Amino acid sequence: MKIKKNFILREVAGTYLVVAVGDAVKDFNKAINLNSTGAFLWKQLQVDLTEEELIGKLLEEYEIDRETAKKDILGFIQRLREANLLE
């Protein structure tokens, strides 16, 4: 899975926002707020990764257990899919 083209992450006043650019603006005219963990995951998904690879990256970056990492990633992926942001 990978983030679709024409969606970018911006940091504004300490807040991470995902916004559409280019042709995507006509179908996606809102912004999504992310915390620092969400921003980390977003950056990882600039390349095609499996769920397991994403879990591994989260475990390398944060001191959490595998179960928590998997739960958090599944929730994050669901949110991205609902917003139609994944290829």
Image (cartoon, helix red, strand yellow):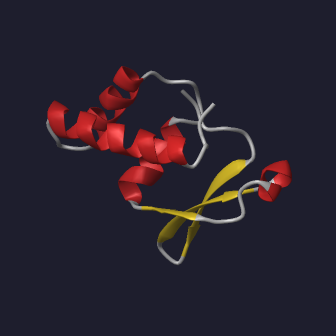
Question: Is residue 26 depicted above or below 56 in this figure?
Answer: below
What residue is at 34 percent from the left and 44 percent from the top? Answer: 75
Question: Is residue 8 depicted above or below 31 in this figure?
Answer: above
Residue nearer the viewer, 23 or 9: 23
Residue nearer the viewer, 62 or 2: 2
Q: Position of residue 27 (x, y in %)?
A: 76, 54
Q: Position of residue 15 (x, y in %)?
A: 48, 71
**Count of all numbered marks drawn on residues in the image:** 0
What residue is at 52 percent from the left and 46 percent from the top? Answer: 82
Report the residue that reaches farthest toward the right: 23
Question: Is residue 60 left or right of 37 when viewed as pictured?
Answer: left
User: Dividing the picture into quarters, in which one does residue 5 lie?
Assistant: top right
Report the residue that reaches farthest toward the bottom: 13
User: Dividing the picture into quarters, in which one does residue 58 lie?
Assistant: top left
Question: Is residue 29 left or right of 82 when viewed as pictured?
Answer: right
Pick the quarter of the image with the C terminus: top right
Q: Position of residue 66 (x, y in %)?
A: 18, 31
Question: Is residue 76 left or right of 22 when viewed as pictured?
Answer: left
What residue is at 57 percent from the left and 49 percent from the top? Answer: 83
Pick the quarter of the image with the N terminus: top right
Q: Position of residue 33 (x, y in %)?
A: 49, 65
Question: Is residue 53 depicted above or below 31 in this figure?
Answer: above
Question: Is residue 41 left or right of 47 when viewed as pictured?
Answer: left
Residue nearer the viewer, 1 or 44: 1
What residue is at 43 percent from the left and 41 percent from the top? Answer: 78
